[in-house]
């Protein structure tokens, strides 16, 4: 278990590692949009083939990637942040909910930890990616060495 400090807000949270396979499941649950088909002529043959360069497809793909990244962030917050919210954090969440409602954004269904991390702790967009990387970190070198030491050596006569 480690910690992560959001430098822009000064908020530090305790973390537990989240299996990268969980993030992969999130990605797999949101298949990317299919590119539109375009009619092309090759010699005397007319056929349809995908056109990934279509501007509308590029926009749809950008929206898709943003949605996947938001879901990965949500997953890392919900599974990776160990701390329960203290009174100050709960007050900040209540104030943020009021502010969101005031500008016409409803956050009734969002978990308090999501609101706290996404809208109070992360004040610099780059920190979201750094947080995700910290939660989905690979095992430390020491952990790899401990695991490797647990394996038996070569079996004699094999």
Image (spheres, rainbow, N blue to C red):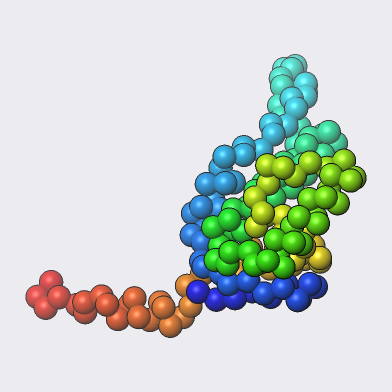
Q: Which residue is drawn at 47% across and 72% down?
A: 139
x, y percentage for residue 38? 77, 24
Depth order, front residue of 103/132: 103
Q: Residue at x 77, y 58 (%)?
A: 119
* Residue 5 is at least partly visible in this image: yes
x, y percentage for residue 50? 71, 30
**Could you tell me which quadrant the C terminus lies in?**
bottom left
- 72 w.r.t. 34: above or below: below
Q: In this view, does 23 lie to the left or right of 65?
A: left
Identify the image quadrant of residue 5: bottom right
Q: In this view, does 36 lie to the left or right of 146?
A: right
Q: In this view, does 146 lie to the left or right of 65?
A: left
- 35 w.r.t. 137: above or below: above
Depth order, front residue of 27/95: 95
Identify the image quadrant of residue 8: bottom right
x, y percentage for residue 99? 86, 51
x, y percentage for residue 3? 59, 76
* Residue 136 is at least partly visible in this image: no
- 40 w.r.t. 20: above or below: above
Q: Residue at x 81, y 65 (%)?
A: 123
Identify the image quadrant of residue 107: top right
């Amino acid at each position: 278990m480690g910690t992560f400090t959001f430098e822009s807000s000064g908020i530090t949270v305790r973390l537990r590692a989240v299996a990268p396979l969980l993030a992969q499941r999130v990605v797999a649950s949101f298949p990317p949009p299919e590119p539109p088909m375009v009619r092309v002529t090759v010699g005397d043959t007319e056929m349809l083939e995908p056109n990934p360069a279509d501007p509308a497809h590029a926009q749809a793909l950008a929206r898709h990637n943003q949605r996947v990244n938001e879901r990965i962030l949500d997953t890392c917050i919900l599974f990776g942040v160990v701390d329960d919210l203290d009174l100050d954090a709960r007050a900040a969440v209540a104030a943020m909910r009021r502010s969101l409602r005031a500008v016409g954004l409803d956050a009734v269904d969002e978990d308090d930890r999501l609101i706290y991390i996404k809208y109070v702790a992360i004040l610099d967009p780059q920190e979201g990616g750094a947080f995700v990387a910290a939660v989905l970190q690979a095992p430390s070198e020491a952990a790899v060495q401990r695991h490797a030491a647990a394996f038996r050596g070569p079996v004699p006569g094999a």
